[in-house]
Image: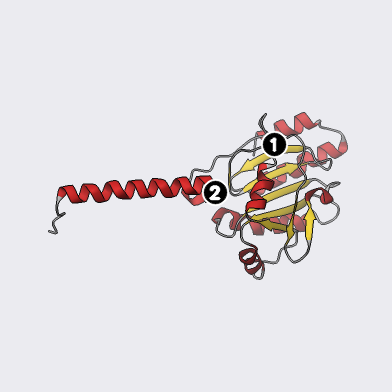
Amino acid sequence: MAKLGNPITLTWVLSAAAVIGFGAYQLVLRAGVVPVETMKTEQASAPPAELSDQLPDFTLAQLGGDEARLHSWLGRPLVINFWATWCAPCLREIPLLVAFQSEQAADGIQIIGVAVDRPDAVEKFAESMDFNYPNLMGESDAMDAAAAFGAEFFALPFTVFADASGRILAVHTGEIHQGDLDNFAAVVDDLKRGQSSVEQARARLGGSL
């Protein structure tokens, strides 16, 4: 059996490792983004009081093009999906979002991706992913865009659901699923038909997102 060695030395090594690990974690927190693999993902309901009721406007570089403003897509209900190439749940969502965008092609819901990542990493990833919806991208500026919604901290993936007038209906932290998108589409349809108020729409989405 191997010996553990000097107990004093072992204690010192373990203590030093704990200090270094905690320091690294604090650096990640200060950076503003915690990879979802290292933290428990919580699901958020309709916008809490501290979140904005109306979509903020921001401008970011667009994948494969010039800069674009978020508000340039107003007029259609929006799904704004913050993601990164290093985020496994984010990557699982993308094929789902691509399929959903195809279903919504005829004047339906518009998906907007916002990559909180290095532009070169996003561009390389996009070569193997046939995006059919626009993607904005940036690092600290994309973080600022997420903060503009009023959230002091968020984990990826982070998705905002808004109506055609830019009113935020729900905010979701964590991986989204087909049922979430289907429910949003149903809520949007009821809003369009005048069969639901914004408050009712938020309550319905809050029960599932």
Residue type at mark 1: give it. Answer: Leu
Q: Which residue is disc 1 drawn over?
A: 205
Q: CA distance from mark 1 to mark 2?
A: 30 Å
Question: Which of these two is toward me, 42 or 177?
Answer: 42
Mark 1, Cα crowd under 10 Å, few <14 / some 14-19 / many 20+, is many
Residue 201, image x, y percentages: 75, 34
Say what secondary structure mark 2 lies in: helix
Question: Which of these two is toward me, 190 or 21?
Answer: 21
Identity of the residue drawn at 22% across and 47% down: 11
Residue 183, image x, y percentages: 71, 42
Q: Is residue 81 above or below residue 121?
A: above
The quadrant of the rendering that contains the C terminus is: top right
Residue type at mark 2: give it. Answer: Ala
Query: Viewed as shown, does residue 150 lie left or right of 105?
Result: left
Q: Which residue is disc 2 drawn over?
A: 31
Residue 124, image x, y percentages: 63, 69
Identity of the residue drawn at 21% across and 50% down: 10
Query: Viewed as shown, does residue 192 lie left or right of 173?
Result: right
Mark 2, Cα crowd under 10 Å, few <14 / some 14-19 / many 20+, is few
